[in-house]
Image (tube, rainbow, N blue to C red):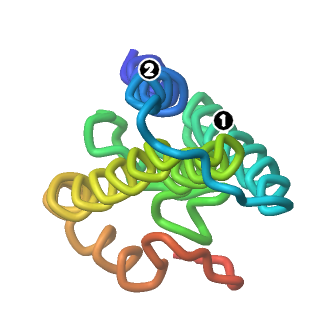
């Protein structure tokens, strides 16, 4: 039940942040000029695809019993790490952020860049002030060891073996 709830909230968050939020931001776009990014828009397509795949993979990884349960609101029993969580602490959120910045580059709109900036910082502060303290309180030294060994946003190239 808790894994299902986590996946449902993850899908709602993906939908809200990558579809509803950009749509709302673009409603305020009429008075702003379109930026000219040229070929950088292709990088935006790659970012959006990479971020979307990463976020969906991480959401799917939560469905596998006994695997990764790093969400503070998921009441799984033990702290285990699998998949991309061995390289970066927040791969789901990183996927959302990459997809969002990809959308901003693709649309070439000032309001999308502003939205991406605001949502990126909101996610960052949510992770720092809610998620990490909740996980530290719940898992104690086990999570502190993981937190000290694995970077928050920029993946490392060595696998965490904890």
Residue at the spot x=74%, y=42% of the render? 53
Specify the quadrant of the image occupied by residue 9.
Answer: top left
Assign the N terminus to one quadrant of the image: top left
User: Can you see residue 48?
Assistant: yes
Residue at the spot x=54%, y=69% of the render? 88
Residue at the spot x=65%, y=59% of the render? 84
Q: Secondary structure at mark 1?
A: helix
Residue annotated with mark 1: 56
User: Can you see residue 139?
Assistant: no
Question: In the rendering, at what x and y percent does residue 2 appear?
Answer: 37, 22
As drawn, 156 above or below 51: below
Question: In the rendering, at what x and y percent does residue 112 appear?
Answer: 49, 43
Give residue 148's mark.
none
> Mark 2 or mark 1, which has the lower sequence index?
2
C-alpha gap between disc 2 and disc 1: 12 Å
70 or 42: which is nearer to us? 42
32 or 27: which is nearer to us? 32
Question: In the rendering, at what x and y percent does residue 29 appear?
Answer: 45, 32
Residue at the spot x=40%, y=45% of the render? 115
As drawn, 144 above or below 114: below
Question: In the rendering, at what x and y percent does residue 98 appear?
Answer: 60, 54
Residue annotated with mark 2: 12
């Amino acid at each position: 039940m808790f894994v299902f709830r986590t996946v449902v909230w993850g899908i709602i968050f993906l939908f809200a942040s990558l579809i509803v939020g950009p749509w709302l931001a673009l409603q305020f776009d009429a008075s702003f000029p379109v930026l000219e990014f040229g070929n950088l828009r292709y990088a935006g397509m790659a970012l959006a695809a990479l971020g979307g795949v990463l976020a969906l993979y991480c959401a799917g990884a939560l469905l596998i019993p006994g695997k990764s349960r790093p969400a503070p609101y998921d009441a799984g029993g033990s702290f285990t790490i699998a998949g991309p969580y061995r390289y970066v602490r927040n791969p789901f959120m990183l996927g959302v952020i990459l997809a969002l910045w990809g959308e901003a580059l693709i649309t070439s709109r000032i309001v999308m860049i502003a939205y991406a900036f605001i949502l990126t910082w909101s996610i960052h502060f949510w992770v720092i002030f809610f998620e990490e303290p909740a996980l530290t309180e719940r898992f104690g030294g086990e999570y502190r060891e993981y937190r000290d060994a694995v970077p928050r946003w920029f993946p490392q190239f060595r696998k965490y073996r904890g």
